[in-house]
Amino acid sequence: MSLADIPGSNFSIADRSAQDRFAERTVVACLIAIAWYNALELIVLCFATFKRYGGWYFWCLLIASFSIIPFGLGYLLIIFDIYSNMFPVAMELVAWVGMVTGQSLVLWSRLHLVCYSPTVLRATLAMIIVDAIILHIPGSVLEFGSHSNKSSLFTHGFNIFERIQLVGFSIQEIILSVIYSWEAVRLLNLRPRGHYRGTLVQLLIVNVAMIMMDAAIIGVQYSGLFDIHVTLKAMVYSVKLKLEYAILGKLVHITEVGGSSSAHTDLSDFVDLSLHNGRTTQQDSDMFTENPEYGPHVRRTRVPSKGSSTDPLRRSLSAAQSPTLDHQIQAQNLHKKRPFAAILLSSNSLSHVRHAESELARNAADNYDWAYLSRCTLVSTWEPCAMCAGAIYWAHIGRLVYLASEAALREVAGIGNPENLTLDLPCWRVFEKGQSVVEVIGPLIEEGWEARVVEDSRRYWG
C-alpha cells in the first residue's frame, strides 16, 4: 500500500487527474534519474581520484553518494506502488540517514580547513549527532507506522514531524554553510589578492547556493507536493555532494605547505615599498663596505616606486607577504604552533617554518655562505625579538621585512603573558649596534598587513 492511498497523507498523485498524475510521475522519474546519475558519478570519482581510501571525508562522501540510490529506489517503489510491503520503506529510511547525515558529515570533515576553533568543530559534530538521534528515530517510527495496518494512528503525526525533521536538518546544514561562508570571507580579507582567492569565492558561492536549495526543498514540501518533494530531495542532495566534492577538495591545497607555493605568487600591489625607508645600521647612506671576512655589504636605500611592476626585487618582496602569513595560518592549523612564521627570499625561493626567525636564520647559516645570505631577504609576520635579531645578524642575512611590530605583538599576547614575555626592544636597535649592515623594512601598516597578522594571531592568543 502506498501513502498515496492513505487518507490525510501528503502523497498527492492519487488525488489528481490522470493527466496531472502522468505529469507529476514524469517529474518524479526525471528527478530520480538525475540523482542517480550524479550519485554514480560521485562513486566513480571517489575511487578514481582519491589516492587513499580512508578518512572521514572519503567515507562520508562515499556513503552519502551511495545512499542516494536506495533512497530514490525506495520512493519509486512506494510512489508507483510497485512493491507494497515494508521493504521499500525500510530501504529509503536507512538511505535517508546515510544521505542527509552523511552530507552534513562531508561538510564537517573539511570544516577544519577553514575554521580553526576546536570548540566550533566539536560543537558542530555534536549538533550533527544529536540531530541524527532526535530527528531520524521518531521520523522512522512514524513513517513505518504510516505504512502499517494502523496507519490512521501515525499518518497525521508523520505529516507534522516530517516537516519538523526537514526544517531541522535544513537548519543544521544552513549553520554549517554559514560557518563556511563566514570563514571564507575572513580568509578573503587575509588574502585580498592571493592565488587562493578564487577557491574561497567559489566556497562562498557554493554555500550560498546550498542554503537556497534547502529553502527550495522546504517550499516544495509545504506546497503539498510530497511526491515531488521527496524525489527533489534526492536530486538536490546529489547536486550538493557534487558541489562539495568540487570545492572542498580544493581547500586541501590552501593548508598544504610547499616551498614552491610562493614562487608562483605575484602580489606586486600588496605593499608599496616606497612608503618604507630601508632602516639600516650605518650613518652614511652611500657607505659601501667590503670586509674579506664577512663578505660584501651594501647600504640599502628605499625601493623606488617607478617601474616597480618590472623590478625583480620589488616583486620578490611584495610577493612574500601573503605566503609568510599563509605559513603562520598553516602552522596554527596543522601543527598547533604559536602564531609566528618567517621565510627567506633568495633566487631559489628557500622557505622554512619552525620557531620562525631564529630557526630559519640558523638553518640558512648552516647551508649557505655569508656572501650569498647578505643578498637574501628574510620576511617575517612579526618583528623579530632581540634573540632572533641576533640570529639574523650572525647569519649575515642582508635584509629583514616584517609585517607587524613587536609593540602590536605585546598588545595581542598581553603584558606578563608567561608564554610570550615580549621585549620592548625594536630589532633595528639590535642591528644598529653591529658592524655589518642589515636593512630593516617594517611594520607594513599602510598596506594593512599588520592588521591581518594581528587578526590571525588573535585566534591563538585570544
Image: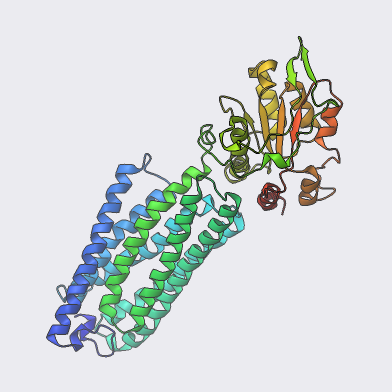
The x, y position of residue 159, in whole percent, is: 35, 84
Residue ID at (35%, 76%): 141
Q: Which image quarter: residue 394?
A: top right
The x, y position of residue 292, in whole percent, is: 76, 9
Residue at the front extreme of this rendering: 306
Question: Quick check: 62 left or right of 291?
Answer: left
Q: Quadrant of the N terminus?
A: bottom left
The x, y position of residue 219, in whole percent, is: 37, 79
Residue ID at (25%, 81%): 148
In the rendered image, is residue 46 in sight?
yes
Q: Is residue 368 above or below residue 278?
A: above
Residue at the top extreme of this rendering: 292
Residue at the left extreme of this rendering: 18
The x, y position of residue 294, in whole percent, is: 76, 14
Q: Is residue 95 above or below residue 428?
A: below
Q: What colouring style does the render use? A: rainbow
Q: Is residue 206 above or below residue 141?
A: above
Q: Which image quarter: residue 155?
A: bottom left
